[in-house]
Image (tube, rainbow, N blue to C red):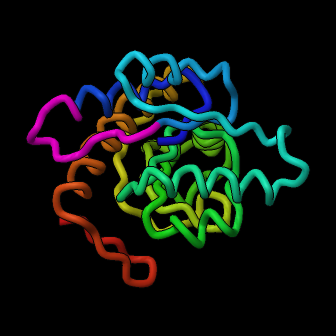
Amino acid sequence: MLISGGGSNLAALLQACADPDYGAAVVAVGADRPSAGGLRLAADAGIPTFVHRVRDYPERTDWDAALTDTIAGYRPDLVVSAGFLKLVGERFLHQFGDRYLNTHNSLLPAFPGIHGPADALAYGVKVAGATLFFVDSGVDSGPIIAQVGVDVHDDDDVDTLTERIKVAERAQLVEYVGRMARGGWTITGRKVIVP
């Protein structure tokens, strides 16, 4: 699992993984900054952690290679981006592209990028939500695994809408990581099927 912040999605996955019927385990947690609070959460749970800061490498491709090699050493079935704020490169996507998933706080392909809820409110949509998808070389453009809708209230601001989306987004992430771990998945073109 890759993180950049406090690890709320990590905490939810760890809680789910405590149930033997869930069928998944977090094998390692990596971050792009040593201050990421989720690293402590992982360490406290006895999960190996690592940090790869982009600035510690002469070139971005060197960082991407180090990140790829470190994760490959853990032999994960899935690599989950849970608030990881760095774009991975070609080598990483070649190794993990069909099993690197990310969650985004809009109903893609609408409102990609870092301002999903704000863009949704500005557009005047009545339903926002979250998308779980496989990462590709574009911006929030990979094959969609699942989506969940969140009603937009007339009195919503960015903070209230974002909070409701986070709750739905976290539940969706936990559900689908478990389903994928237990039953696998197929990708045909842009169509993803999770049994």
Q: Where is residue 101 in the image (x, y as percent from the top left)?
A: 46, 55
Q: Position of residue 79 (x, y in %)?
A: 45, 52
Q: Is residue 125 magenta?
A: no
Compared with 98, 107 (above or below) is above
Dividing the picture into quarters, in which one does residue 184 lie?
Answer: bottom left
Residue 155 visible somewhere in the drawing: no
Q: Is residue 23 magenta?
A: yes
Observer-nearest residue: 162 or 43?
43
Q: In this view, does 183 lie to the left or right of 192?
A: left
Compared with 64, 20 (above or below) is above
Q: In which quarter of the image is the C terminus?
A: bottom left
Name which residue lies at 51% across and 32% down: 49
Residue furthest left as drawn = 21
Q: Is residue 12 left or right of residue 72?
A: left
Q: Where is residue 193 in the image (x, y as percent from the top left)?
A: 27, 71
The span picked out in magenta is 17-28
Q: Is residue 177 left or right of residue 140?
A: left
Name which residue lies at 28% across and 69% down: 185
Observer-nearest residue: 32 or 188?
32
Observer-nearest residue: 80 or 153?
80
